[in-house]
Amino acid sequence: MNQFYVKTSSDYITKSDFEKFDVWCEWASSDEIKYIKSQLKSPELFEELFLKPYEKGLDCYYPIHEGNSLPYREFMHVACKAKILENVELTGYVSLVCNEVTSLTLWINSSEVQLLRSDRLIADEDNPKNISFIVEYFGLELFDEIYYSTSYNDSKGDLIQGRLQLIET
C-alpha cells in the first residue's frame, strides 16, 4: 500500500502521482475532513498539510485508495484508459466535478494533452491544438471520438466511463 501524502497547487498531481494512486481529490469541503484526518498520522497534521496551504491560496490534493466505489467529492481526478479509433490506446485521467466528467487528460510521450467537456470535444480555442497534436503524433486520420474507461464507480454507483465526441462549433 502506498503512503498517503498531500500535494499543493504549486506541485500539481502528475503522471508519477497517478502511478502511486489512481484517484486524487482536490480538497474543497469540510465534509472531507473526517476522511482526511483518518489517513494522517495525527489529526494535528491537517492544519499543517491543508489549512496553512489553503490560507495561502494553494489548492490541496489527496488520494483515495479504499476500493472501486468512490465516495462523493466535489472535485476528483480518476486514472483512466482511453482509446482513439481502434488502434490507439492511451492512459490519463478524467476530472469530475460533482460526479460529472468535465475533462479528459491524456499522457502522450512526455506531453499532457487536456480535452475539455464531458460529452463533446468542442473545437474551441483549446482543443483544436490538442486534437491536431494527437492526429500528427500518431499519424491518424481525423478522429471524432475518444472512449475512456476506469475501474471505478462514482458515488451514485455508476461506472466512470464514456466517450467524448468531437463537434465543430
Image: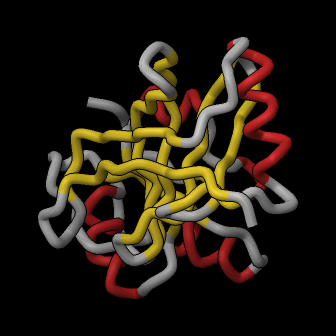
Q: Quadrant of the C terminus?
A: bottom right
Task: Please give left or right for residue 163 compared with residue 118 in the image.
Answer: left
Name the residue: 37% across, 37% down.
Answer: 3
Between 72 and 143, the residue placed more toward the observer is: 143
Total of numbered circles in the picture? Answer: 0
Q: Position of residue 124 (x, y in %)?
A: 80, 62
Is 158 above or below relative to 34?
above
Question: Is residue 93 shown left or right of residue 166?
Answer: left
Task: Estimate the x, y position of residue 53 in percent, counting from the top left.
Answer: 68, 70
100 or 26: nearer the eye? 100
- Which x, y percent locates residue 118? 49, 63
Residue 44 occupies quadrant: bottom left
| Location of residue 98 (image quadrant) | bottom left
Up-down relation of residue 37 to residue 51 (above or below): above
Classify residue 129 as left or right of residue 134.
Answer: right
The residue shown at (66%, 77%) is 54
Q: Is residue 31 above or below residue 10?
A: below
Q: Is residue 137 above or below residue 20?
A: above
